[in-house]
Amino acid sequence: MSRRINSFIGLALIAGVTTLPNQAVLAQSSTDLIAAKAASCPALPDVIWWKTTHVKIVRYVDRKYSGDWTPYIIKWENYKKKMQGILDGNGTALVKSRDIRLRGKQLAEHIIQIEERLVVTRCLKDKFSGQVAQNGTGNSSGDRINPNVHQASLVNGPAISKEDQIASIVEAKLDVEVTARCDGDTPTFQVTNLGDKWPRLAAISIHRTDGNALVSKRRMKLANSQQATFKIRKRGKALRGEIGIFVQPSWAKRPFRYDTKIRCK
């Protein structure tokens, strides 16, 4: 009798194993379903540093915004306005990962590409709004506001002083904008957290770029939309020259490089 019971339990366990769902198959099925539903939306513009697809965008909005497309679209609309402001001010946008500078006609063409992406995104919103792509996995690293473009220079800009330098940091679970400006002869940095609340402290260090001499260092934890401002007041001739800022999160390693720099008279 005990042999029969043991045999029955063994068969039940084997049956249980054989009926478990194959996660790879589920993920591929989800990918195919999303791709099929999105097929009637226009193709994304060919921008080599975006590296995204319809499926990645849908999954990113599902994961980041719980299927709410409005904040995602607003971010891209704001990004387009920022690029338009640089163009109107005869400025230059720098694609850091490719060492490409966009100005004039090239920048105008990129703004058209941003609008084309917005058209695609609104189409995806119509098809997927309020729906979550379950069981999906995938890399959505290209689906955020372009992490590689920041303002390199701006002359006679309508909204930003020509001395201002603006950089975007989207890496190591950071989504941060860093602005550097001169308040008279005082270098001033403003760090704005555009992403989620930081999980732990980050070290914000300010240096003289000549020799990387440390001027100031603070550890802080910023909530969404929270800003921190740093004014570097000169003491005699000690802080003359170029000043740079670097943000180092405690939860991920970033190679040291200045996120933005400025020189005040």
Image (tube, rainbow, N blue to C red):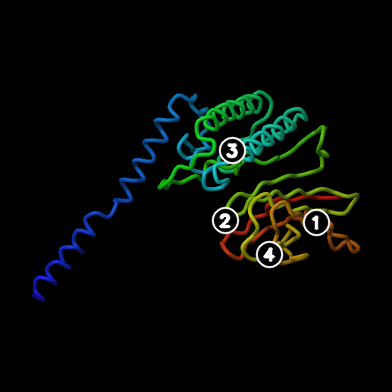
Residue 117 percent coordinates (x, y): 57, 29
- Which residue is nearer to you in this view: 211 or 1? 1
> Quick check: marks 1 and 2 in contact, CB under 8 Å?
no
Real-space Cα separation, disc 3 to disc 1, in angstroms:
31 Å
Q: Secondary structure at mark 1?
A: strand
Q: Quadrant of residue 33?
A: top left
SS class, disc 4: strand
Pointers 3 and 2 in contact (C-beta within 8 Å) = no
Of the image marks 3 and 1, the number of the one nearer the N terminus: 3
On screen, residue 17 versus residue 127, left or right, reads: left
Per the rendering, the mark at residue 172 is 2
User: Mark 3 or mark 2, which has the lower sequence index?
Assistant: 3
Q: Do the CB atoms of the residues marked 3 and 1 lie less than 8 Å apart?
A: no
Between 264 and 21, the residue placed more toward the observer is 21
Q: Amino acid at mark 2?
A: Ala
Residue 243 picture location, percent across and down: 77, 55
Tell me the quarter of the picture where residue 204 sits. Answer: bottom right
The span from disc 4 to disc 3 (Cα, nearest Å) is 33 Å
Task: Return the residue found at the far front.
Answer: 1
What is the spatial separation of the Cα atoms under label 1 and label 4, in whole angstroms? Answer: 14 Å
Q: CA distance from mark 4 to mark 2?
A: 13 Å
Q: Which residue is mark 3?
A: 69
Judged from the image, the secondary structure of the residue bearing numbered disc 3 is loop
The residue that appears at 88% across and 50% down in the rendered structure is: 183
